[in-house]
C-alpha cells in the first residue's frame, strides 16, 4: 500500500459527482440482493400466529428474553385439541427485540415471524395529546394473527424441523423383540439407563400441559427437571407429593400426560411414564429419600375397604396426617386390580410390592382375607371408625348375554387374569382362544394367552382405531401374533361339554353424526361367521359390586349411572362415608384412583376437623 | 510546544486552567462516554475517565437468563461488531458443554466474523474522517458498510444485531446464491480500496493531523494490555487468529500486516491493510467451505445445562482481544459471565496516561485511532 503524500489524490473523489448517487438503501429497495421483493426472506418482523394450531402452552412467553409476550385468554378462538388452552400470546412491540427465540421454541410451529415492519411511529396529528398513549398502546401491543401470514419471514419449515431447537425424536428404552418376549412373562421394557433418561428428560419444555391432563395433576415438569439434573431422588420427592405408587405408575399408567405433551404435536411426546419408572427404580428406599414429615397420631381411626390404588393412596396421605388407618382386603394379598388384573410382563409383582410395602411400612394396618359383609358387617365399621373410605373398584364382570355362555371354557376377563396371576391358568398350549372386547383388559388377556401358548384372536365390535386400549398395547399385541377381527359381534357359543365354536356377525358401522365412535349395527344382511375355538374370554367391562352395603345406605348415596356420585373430596351424602377409585371416577385407571384417594384424604381431614 | 497566550487576559490564572467535558455527547467521541479534561490553555494537564453513562448491566442480566436467551442480549455489547460477542460466548459455552461444532458451522462463523471485521474497519474509516473533518470518508464508508449489512440481513435476518450464532453452530444454513453475492461484494470492496487510499491515507492534511500523534510504544502497549491492530501498529506481531488459532483459522492462509510506527497514522493504516487480509480470508472460505450440518443439536433452551466449570474464550475482534469468562455451576443459567472488551484497557486506563500533554484537537484523533468503543468497557 502506497501512503505517499499526494495533495491531488483526494481530488479523485470528484469523479463521483458524475456518478449515480449511492445512499443508504432502505430494505425495500434491496430487490437485487434478495431476489425477492421486500426485506430479507429471513427477516424477523412482526409475528404471525395461526390460532387454529396454537395450543396456548406459553413456551413463547417463557423463553422471551425481553418479557414482551403475555399469554392472554382469548374468547374468540377454539382450542386446537382436547388438551389445548385458549390462551394466546399478546406481544408488546415496545419490548420485543425481534430475536426469534419464541419461534424457535413454538412446539406447534404456529408462531412465526413475517417480513412486515414499521420504520418509525408517527401518531396522527389529529389525535388529541391525551389520547396518544392509548393510540401508542394500540399500535404496539397486539395479538398476532394471520394478518401478515402472506409475507412470511423467519419461519420454521417442516424440513428443518429436526435441526431446530426442540428435540422431536424420542429416546425409547430398550425393549425385548416380539419374537422373544412372547414366550416369557418377564418384563420386556427395560428401565432407562442414566444417559437415556437424561437425554429424554432434556426434551421437556417445562410448559406443564401434561399437568392439566394428568387425572392426579402430578408435578411432572418438576420431576422431569430433576432427572435432567441427574437427581432421581429429588425427582421421586416430587412424585411422592401426589403419588405414593411411583413404580406402578411408571410401568402401567395410562399416561394421559403423554397425549397432552406439546412436543408430541409435531414430533414424539416425552416418555413421561418411563421417566417416572426410572426415578422410582433408581431409589432403593423411598421413605429415606422422600423424608415426608408425619404428624403426631391424633387418635382418630379410619377404615378403607379394598387394598387397591385408591385405598393405598388414601391410607398413605391420611397416615401422614396422623390418622390411624386400617385397610380391609378380601383377597390374601393387597393391590387389587394391580395385583390380579395386570399381567406380570407389564408390572412385575416385586415392583408392585416395593411400592405397597413402602406405604404399609408407615404403620398402616392391613387386614387381608377379610371380606366386608361376610367376615365383618359394614355397620360395625361405620360404628367403630371415625370415617370409612370405600375403594373396592369394579369387580363384577359384565356378561356377554348370548346363548352358550354358561359352557365351561367361557371365562370373564378379570377371572382369567386372576388365574394367570395366580399361575393357575388352564393349559393353553396349542389351544384356540378368542377374546371379546377392545380395552386394556382384553389386551392383557390376549397377550397373556399368547405367552401361555395359545392362538389368540380378538373380536371387537368397532374398528381397531376405536379401541379404548392403548395404541401401543394394540401394536405390541399384533407384533406378538394376536389376530384382530373388526366389527365382530358375537352371537352364539356352540359346544356340548365345553366350548367348540363361536358364531359372530360382521356388523356394519354407522358413523356417529356427532363425530364420536361409529355404532355397530347387526341386521339380517350382516355376514355370519363361525370359528372353531377352545376358550372364549369376555373382557367387555366391569360393574361395581357394592352388595356389602346395607340397602338404606345404597339408597342414600344414589347412583349416577354406574358411578357413585361424590364431590371433589370423595364425600357422599352419607356422613363419614367416602368413595374413590373406579367406583366414582370418570376415568377408570390407577392414576385416577390414586388421585381420588388423595382427594378423599383431604376430604376426611376437613370432615373430621369440622366435626370437633 | 510553548503555549502562546491569545491576549493579556489569558495570562490570568482564572482563565488559564479550566475543566472541559468531552462527551457523553460530543462529535469527537465514539459513544456515550465522557472524559473530564483539566486544561491548561490548549494543553491537557490531567484526565479523568467518567464511565457509567452506558452501563446496561449486561453481565448481571446474563446471570438471570437462560444460556441461549443471552444470545439476544450480548450482541448489544458492541454495536460496530456485534458478532464477536455471539461467537466468543458460544465458543465458551461449547467448550464447557463439550459440544463439537461441525466444520461447516466453523467456516460460517469465520465468514461472519471477517465480514463483521470489514464492516467495523469501514466504521473506523468513517471515524478517521469524522475526527479530522474529512466528511466524505464517513459517507463512503457507511455506504459501503451497508452492502455488508445487506448480506448479513439475507443470511441472518438482522442487519446490525444478527442473533445468528447458537451453541453448537449457527441458526440457519447459508442461503442459495449467498456466497456468489459475497464474492461480488468482495470484488467491489477491493475495487474501492484505492479510492479510500486516495481519499484518506494519501491525503496530506490527514497525514499531518495523525502522524506522530498518540505515540504508543510496544512496551507501553503490552504493559497496558492493549491488543489488536493497536498493538500490531506498535510493532508487536500478535494476533489470536495466528497465535492461538480458533475455529478454522489454522486452515486459512493470511498475513499479519506490519506498520509498526506506533502513532495514530500507522494504526489507521494497519486497519486498512488488515481489511485486505480479511477479504483474502473470505475468498478462501468461499472456496473451502465444506458441505454438512450447520449445527450440532443441543437440548432445548429450558433444559440446556452447561456442566460446572470455568472457561475464558476469546476471539480477535477488529479492536483486539474480545473475551468471555464464563462460570457455570451446572445450571440452566450462567453463574457469572465476565466480558473482556478490547477497548477497556485503552479507553479507561491507558487514556489517562496517553492524553496527558496532548492538545485538545488531538483527542478525537487519538480516540478514533485507538478505535475505542465505550459499550465494551461499560458493560
Image (spheres, rainbow, N blue to C red):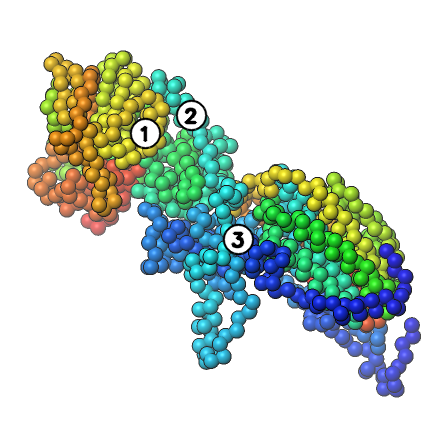
Is residue A277 visible in this depiction of the protein?
A: yes
For mark 3, name the chain: A
Per the image, label 1 sits on a secondary structure element best described as helix
Check the image and name the residue furthest to the bottom.
B8
Cα separation between marks 3 and 1: 41 Å
Secondary structure of the residue carrying tag 2 is loop
Mark 2–mark 1 distance (CA, rounded to whole Å): 16 Å
Name the residue at 81% across, 72% down.
B360
Q: Find residue A40 and report its horizontal and vertical position in percent.
A: 58, 56
Direction left: furthest residue = A552
Q: Give coordinates of residue A584: x percent, y percent.
A: 21, 40
Farthest right residue in view: B2
Residue at label 2? A175
Q: How much space separates mark 2 and mark 3, taking CA atoms?
A: 40 Å
The image quadrant where one finds the N terminus of chain B is bottom right
In the image, A244 versus A190, the foreground residue is: A190
Residue depth check, mark 2 versus mark 1: number of the one nearer the observer: 1
Label of residue A154 in the image: 3
Q: Dot 1 falls on which chain?
A: A
Q: Compared to A344, does A211 lie above or below?
A: below
Residue closest to the eye, B378 or A71:
A71
Chain letter of disc 2? A
Residue A27 percent across, percent down from the top left = 60, 62
Residue B138 location (% of width, % of height): 74, 66
Q: Nearer the N terminus, badge 2 or badge 3?
A: 3
Report the side of A275 relative to B321 (left or right): left
* Residue A210 falls left or right of residue A22: left
Residue A330 visible in the shown view: no
Give the structural element (helix, strand or loop) at label 3.
loop
Discs 2 and 3 share one subunit: yes
Residue at x 47%, y 37% (from the top left corner): A169
Camera-nearest residue between A38 and A153: A38
Amino acid at each position: 500500500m502506497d501512503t505517499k503524500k499526494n495533495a491531488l489524490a483526494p481530488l479523485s473523489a470528484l469523479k463521483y459527482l458524475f456518478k449515480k448517487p449511492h445512499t443508504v438503501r432502505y430494505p425495500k429497495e434491496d430487490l437485487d440482493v434478495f431476489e425477492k421483493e421486500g426485506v430479507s426472506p429471513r427477516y424477523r418482523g412482526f409475528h404471525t400466529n395461526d390460532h387454529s394450531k396454537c395450543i396456548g402452552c406459553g413456551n413463547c412467553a417463557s423463553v422471551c428474553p425481553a418479557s414482551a409476550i403475555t399469554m392472554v385468554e382469548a374468547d374468540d378462538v377454539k382450542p386446537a385439541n382436547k388438551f389445548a388452552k385458549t390462551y394466546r400470546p399478546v406481544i408488546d412491540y415496545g419490548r420485543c427485540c425481534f430475536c426469534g427465540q419464541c419461534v424457535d421454541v413454538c412446539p406447534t410451529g404456529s408462531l412465526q415471524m413475517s417480513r412486515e415492519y414499521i420504520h418509525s411511529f408517527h401518531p396522527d396529528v389529529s389525535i388529541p395529546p391525551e389520547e396518544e398513549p392509548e393510540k401508542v398502546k394500540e399500535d404496539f401491543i397486539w395479538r398476532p394473527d394471520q394478518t401478515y401470514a402472506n409475507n412470511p419471514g423467519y419461519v420454521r419449515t417442516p424440513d428443518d424441523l429436526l435441526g431446530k431447537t426442540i428435540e422431536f425424536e424420542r429416546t425409547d428404552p430398550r425393549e425385548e423383540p416380539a419374537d422373544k418376549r412372547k414366550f416369557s412373562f418377564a418384563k420386556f421394557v427395560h428401565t432407562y439407563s442414566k444417559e437415556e433418561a437424561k437425554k429424554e428428560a432434556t426434551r421437556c419444555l417445562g410448559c406443564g400441559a401434561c399437568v392439566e391432563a394428568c387425572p392426579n395433576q402430578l408435578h411432572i415438569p418438576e420431576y422431569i427437571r430433576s432427572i435432567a439434573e441427574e437427581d432421581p431422588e429429588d425427582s421421586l420427592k416430587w412424585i411422592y407429593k401426589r403419588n405414593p405408587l411411583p413404580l406402578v405408575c411408571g410401568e402401567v399408567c395410562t399416561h394421559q400426560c403423554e397425549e397432552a405433551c406439546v412436543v408430541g404435536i409435531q414430533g414424539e411426546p416425552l416418555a413421561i411414564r418411563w421417566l417416572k419408572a426410572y426415578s422410582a427404580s433408581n431409589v432403593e428406599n423411598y421413605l429415606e429419600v422422600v423424608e415426608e414429615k408425619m404428624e403426631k397420631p391424633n387418635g382418630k381411626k379410619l377404615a378403607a375397604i379394598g387394598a387397591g390404588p385408591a385405598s393405598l393412596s388414601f391410607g398413605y396421605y391420611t397416615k401422614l396426617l396422623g390418622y390411624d388407618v386400617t385397610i380391609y382386603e378380601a383377597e390374601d394379598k393387597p393391590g387389587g386390580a394391580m395385583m390380579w388384573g395386570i399381567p406380570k410382563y407389564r408390572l412385575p409383582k416385586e415392583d408392585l410390592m416395593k411400592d405397597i410395602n413402602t406405604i404399609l411400612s408407615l404403620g398402616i394396618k392391613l387386614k387381608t382375607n377379610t371380606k366386608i359383609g361376610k367376615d365383618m358387617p359394614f355397620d360395625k365399621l361405620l360404628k367403630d371408625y371415625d370415617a370409612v373410605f370405600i375403594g373396592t373398584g369394579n369387580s363384577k364382570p359384565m356378561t356377554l348375554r348370548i346363548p352358550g355362555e354358561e359352557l365351561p371354557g367361557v371365562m370373564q376377563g378379570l377371572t382369567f387374569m386372576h388365574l394367570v396371576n395366580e399361575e393357575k391358568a388352564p393349559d393353553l398350549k396349542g389351544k384356540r382362544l378368542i377374546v371379546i372386547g377392545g380395552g386394556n383388559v382384553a389386551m392383557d388377556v390376549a397377550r397373556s394367552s399368547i405367552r401361555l401358548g395359545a392362538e389368540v384372536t380378538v373380536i371387537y365390535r368397532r374398528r381397531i382405531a376405536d379401541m379404548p386400549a392403548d395404541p401401543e398395547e394394540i401394536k405390541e399385541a399384533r407384533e406378538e401374533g394376536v389376530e384382530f377381527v373388526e366389527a365382530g359381534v358375537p352371537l352364539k357359543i356352540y359346544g356340548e361339554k365345553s366350548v367348540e365354536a363361536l358364531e359372530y356377525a360382521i356388523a356394519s358401522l354407522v358413523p356417529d353424526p356427532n363425530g364420536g365412535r361409529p355404532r355397530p349395527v347387526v341386521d339380517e344382511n350382516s355376514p355370519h361367521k363361525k370359528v372353531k375355538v377352545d376358550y372364549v374370554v369376555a373382557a367387555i367391562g366391569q360393574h361395581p359390586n357394592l352388595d356389602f352395603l346395607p340397602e338404606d345406605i345404597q339408597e342414600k348415596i344414589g347412583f349416577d349411572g354406574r358411578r357413585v356420585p361424590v364431590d371433589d373430596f370423595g364425600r357422599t351424602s352419607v356422613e363419614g362415608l367416602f368413595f374413590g377409585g373406579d367406583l366414582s371416577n370418570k376415568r377408570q385407571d390407577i392414576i385416577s384412583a390414586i388421585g381420588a384417594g388423595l382427594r378423599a384424604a383431604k376430604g376426611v381431614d376437613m370432615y373430621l376437623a369440622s366435626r370437633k | 510546544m510553548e503555549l502562546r497566550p491569545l491576549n493579556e487576559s489569558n495570562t490570568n490564572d482564572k482563565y488559564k486552567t479550566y475543566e472541559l467535558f468531552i462527551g457523553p455527547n460530543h462529535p469527537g467521541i465514539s459513544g456515550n462516554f465522557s472524559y473530564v479534561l483539566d486544561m491548561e490553555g490548549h494543553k491537557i494537564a490531567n484526565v479523568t475517565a467518567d464511565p457509567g453513562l452506558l452501563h446496561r448491566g449486561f453481565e448481571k442480566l446474563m446471570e438471570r437468563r437462560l444460556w441461549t436467551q443471552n444470545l439476544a442480549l450480548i450482541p448489544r455489547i458492541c454495536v460496530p461488531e456485534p458478532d464477536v460477542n455471539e461467537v466468543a460466548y458460544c465458543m465458551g459455552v461449547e467448550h464447557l458443554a463439550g459440544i463439537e461444532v461441525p466444520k461447516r458451522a466453523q467456516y460460517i462463523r469465520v465468514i461472519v466474523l471477517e465480514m463483521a471485521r470489514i464492516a467495523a474497519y469501514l466504521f473506523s474509516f468513517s471515524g478517521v474522517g469524522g475526527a479530522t473533518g474529512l466528511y466524505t470518508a464517513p459517507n463512503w464508508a457507511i455506504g459501503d458498510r451497508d452492502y455488508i449489512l445487506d448480506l448479513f440481513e439475507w443470511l441472518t435476518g438482522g442487519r446490525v444485531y444478527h442473533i445468528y450464532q447458537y451453541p453448537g453452530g449457527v441458526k440457519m444454513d447459508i442461503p442459495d446464491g449467498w456466497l456468489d453475492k459475497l464474492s461480488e461484494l468482495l470484488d467491489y470492496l477491493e475495487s474501492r480500496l484505492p479510492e479510500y487510499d486516495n481519499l484518506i491515507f494519501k491525503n496530506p492534511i490527514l497525514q499531518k493531523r495523525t502522524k506522530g500523534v498518540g505515540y504508543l510504544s510496544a512496551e507501553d502497549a503490552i504493559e497496558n494490555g492493549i491488543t489488536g491492530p493497536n498493538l500490531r501498529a506498535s510493532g508487536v506481531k500478535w494476533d489470536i487468529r495466528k497465535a492461538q488459532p480458533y475455529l478454522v483459522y489454522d486452515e486459512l492462509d493470511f498475513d499479519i500486516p506490519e506498520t509498526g510506527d506506533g502513532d495514530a497514522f500507522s494504526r489507521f493504516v494497519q486497519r486498512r491493510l488488515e481489511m485486505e487480509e480479511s477479504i483474502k480470508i473470505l475468498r478462501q472460505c468461499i472456496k473451502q467451505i465444506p458441505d454438512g450440518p450447520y449445527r450440532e443439536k443441543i437440548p432445548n433452551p429450558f433444559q440446556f445445562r452447561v456442566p460446572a466449570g470455568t472457561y475464558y474464550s476469546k476471539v480477535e475482534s477488529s479492536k483486539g482481544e474480545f473475551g468471555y469468562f464464563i462460570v457455570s455451576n451446572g445450571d440452566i443459567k450462567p453463574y457469572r459471565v465476565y466480558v473482556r472488551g478490547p477497548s477497556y484497557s485503552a479507553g479507561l486506563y491507558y487514556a489517562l496516561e496517553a492524553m496527558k500533554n496532548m492538545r485538545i484537537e488531538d483527542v478525537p484523533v487519538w480516540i478514533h485511532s485507538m478505535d475505542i468503543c465505550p459499550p465494551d468497557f461499560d458493560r
